[in-house]
Structure formats: structure tokens, C-alpha cells
Amino acid sequence: MLIGKRGAAATAISTATADRIVVRGRDLAADLMGSTSFTDFYFLLATGRAPTAEQSFFLDLALVSLAEHGLTRTRFRAPSRRAFWAAARWCSARRTWRAR
């Protein structure tokens, strides 16, 4: 039974040769390492584009809320309502984001 397409596997996420790794069309060593944050790189991997400042900010909040629980298999899921409201209070206190 065949599952998936016939032929060689292909992906738009990354490619590698003996001297270069390209992630979403950007050279890993030349374009990303040292100039891109982990949060922005994670967003690029997931969506294929660079995040806006607001998207980067909220993804960073979500990643921090995941790390607060520890790096266990059962903790990698959507952030809890408690974490969301904690982030909302943090933003509100600093007036860095407002609901539109």
C-alpha cells in the first residue's frame, strides 16, 4: 500500500548540499545565523515568511509560557488561558499592545 506521492520526497522548508543549507529560501549560515532570533526563525520555519513585530512579540510570549512548564512531551500544546491572560496583563501594564 502506497501512502503519499510516488518519487523522491520534496519540501519547501529546507534543502542541503555539501556546502550549504537553505531554509525557506534563505542561507542558514549567511543570512540567518547571528542575525535572526529563535522566535523569528521558528515563525519562518512554520509559515515561510518573516513575522511582523507584533507576531514576533506574541510568539515569543507563547514560547516563554511553554518553557515555564518545562520541556516535557505533554507540555507542547496550545498555551493555557492562564498563560494568555498573564501575557495580556503584561502587555496592558506596559501599554505595548492594544486590542483593535
Image: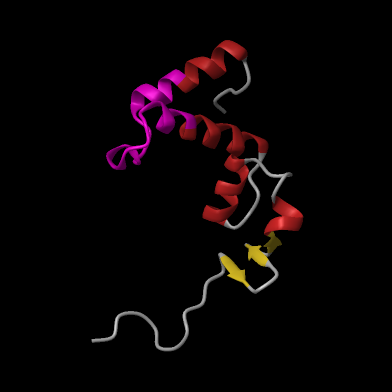
Question: In the figure, 19 relative to 59: above or below?
Answer: below
Question: In the figure, 75 relative to 68: above or below?
Answer: below
Q: Residue furthest top?
A: 93
Q: Residue furthest right?
A: 30
Question: In the figure, 72 relative to 93: above or below?
Answer: below
Q: Nearer the viewer, residue 11 or 98?
A: 11
49 left or right, relative to 3: right
Question: Which quarter of the rendering shows the N terminus?
Answer: bottom left
Occupied quadrant, residue 47? bottom right
Which residues fall within the magenta stretch? 64-86
The residue shown at (57%, 28%) is 100
Residue 37 horizontal/vertical position (percent): 65, 40
The residue shown at (69%, 49%) is 33
47 is within the stretch colored magenta: no
Residue 45 horizontal/vertical position (percent): 55, 55
Residue 39 horizontal/vertical position (percent): 58, 40
Occupied quadrant, residue 21? bottom right
65 left or right, relative to 19: left
The residue shown at (63%, 54%) is 49
77 is within the stretch colored magenta: yes
Question: In the figure, 86 relative to 14: above or below?
Answer: above
